[in-house]
Image (cartoon, rainbow, N blue to C red):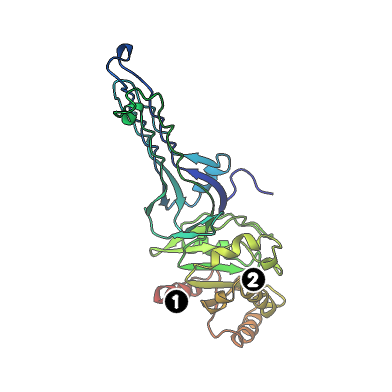
Amino acid sequence: MYNRHMFVDEVDLTLSGGHGGPGKVSFGPAMRSGPDGGNGGKGGDLYIKTTTDLTVLRVYTRNKAISAENGQPGGSNKKYGLDGIDKQILVPVGSLIRDLNTGEEIELNEPDQRVLFAKGGLGGRGNFEFRSSTNTTPEYAQPGLDGVLKKVKVILRLIADYGLIGLPNAGKSSLLNELTNAQAKIANYPFTTLEPNLGVFNDKIIADIPGLIEGASEGKGLGIKFLKHIEKVVILLHCVSAESEDPVGDYQTVRKELGEFNPELLQKKEIVLLTKTDLVDPKQIKAAVAKLKKLNKNILPVSIHDYDQLQDLISQLNAK
């Protein structure tokens, strides 16, 4: 169902700092000058940094184990090994990093946010460090310490100002394309949208969330994969098709799934958009609006082919 270009919003990774370089066991010519083994270099640190590229998790679908560079071994003549180079990996803004061993979680919600995640191990001491009055020729050195290793799950939750939600084929992608410069794929069949699409409207982000169906909160259809993306959306734009034989039922189906996934979603601000109004009789539109207003006062008929209706929607969005 999904190809290699699919939207990746969860990935398990093993992240580690670099291993400290080993110390050196070395002596001067014929051991007359005593031990001169140098210390190993420190392992590199691993950092996580956020990016606005929401597709970046794709690069980790094959490479799931990532480490900073190891420290270099110590050398003779008291030469220190070079420290390992730090490593930085990118995750999308809105990522939650969950430590799979401890359960600890951190959220990264700011662009270009950078955190030290896994420290590199200390380098081992060379035998020069172990000389003493009682042991003038130590023949051992430390191996260097492991870097911190963490097994994590990265979970992306989109951060958007507006979230277009609704049943499949409710006109969400068409509306996104009309309001923004997004070029979301559209067609007259369910599940055309297999991943969230984003567009920018007056410097605000609109997310087109793939269509929900009854049972989505239990994993049916594509719902469970995408319901989490609604959690950080500020305002829900709930699309209900005017072509539907039961617009109230459609509305209630989606609301039910939101509530079962996370009751807090039902507290979000919501505008109900009765879409595709150009395809039905005005009397049918009026009847649907009257029924929906019993559940939500904020109902707005809209068609991408009706300039005045689009302007009404734009005015509402600008006022929010």
Left or right of residue 118, residue 213 in this image: right
Q: Residue furthest front?
A: 134
Question: Is residue 15 visible in the rendered structure shown here?
Answer: yes
Q: Residue furthest top?
A: 30
Residue positioned 38% across, 63% down in the render? 203
Question: Is residue 304 visible in the rendered structure shown here?
Answer: no
**Residue 15: x %, y % from top left:** 50, 44
Query: Does residue 138 lie above or below 210 as drawn?
Result: above
Q: Amino acid at mark 1?
A: Gln
Query: Does residue 156 lie above or below 213 as drawn?
Result: above
Residue positioned 50% across, 74% down in the render? 309
Q: What is the CA distance from the residue labelled 1 to the residue labelled 2?
A: 23 Å
Left or right of residue 22, residue 12 in this image: right
Q: Quadrant of the C terminus?
A: bottom left
Local secondary structure at mark 1 = helix
Q: What residue is shown with label 2?
A: 279
**Residue 31: x %, y % from top left:** 32, 15
Q: Residues within 10 Å of mark 2 (few under 14, many from 20)?
A: few
Q: What residue is shown with label 1?
A: 316
Q: Earlier in the sequence, mark 1 or mark 2?
A: 2
For the residues bearing labels 1 and 2, Cβ distance under 8 angstroms: no
Q: Amino acid at mark 2?
A: Leu
Local secondary structure at mark 2 = helix
Q: Residue furthest left?
A: 33
Residue positioned 37% across, 31% down in the render? 40
**Residue 129: x %, y % from top left:** 32, 31
Callout in the foreground (1, 2): 1
- Along the line of sight, the residue nearer the viewer: 231 or 4: 231
Query: Does residue 82 lie above or below 157 as drawn?
Result: above
Query: Does residue 153 lie above or below 32 as drawn?
Result: below
- Along the line of sight, the residue nearer the viewer: 112 or 308: 112
**Residue 247: x %, y % from top left:** 67, 77
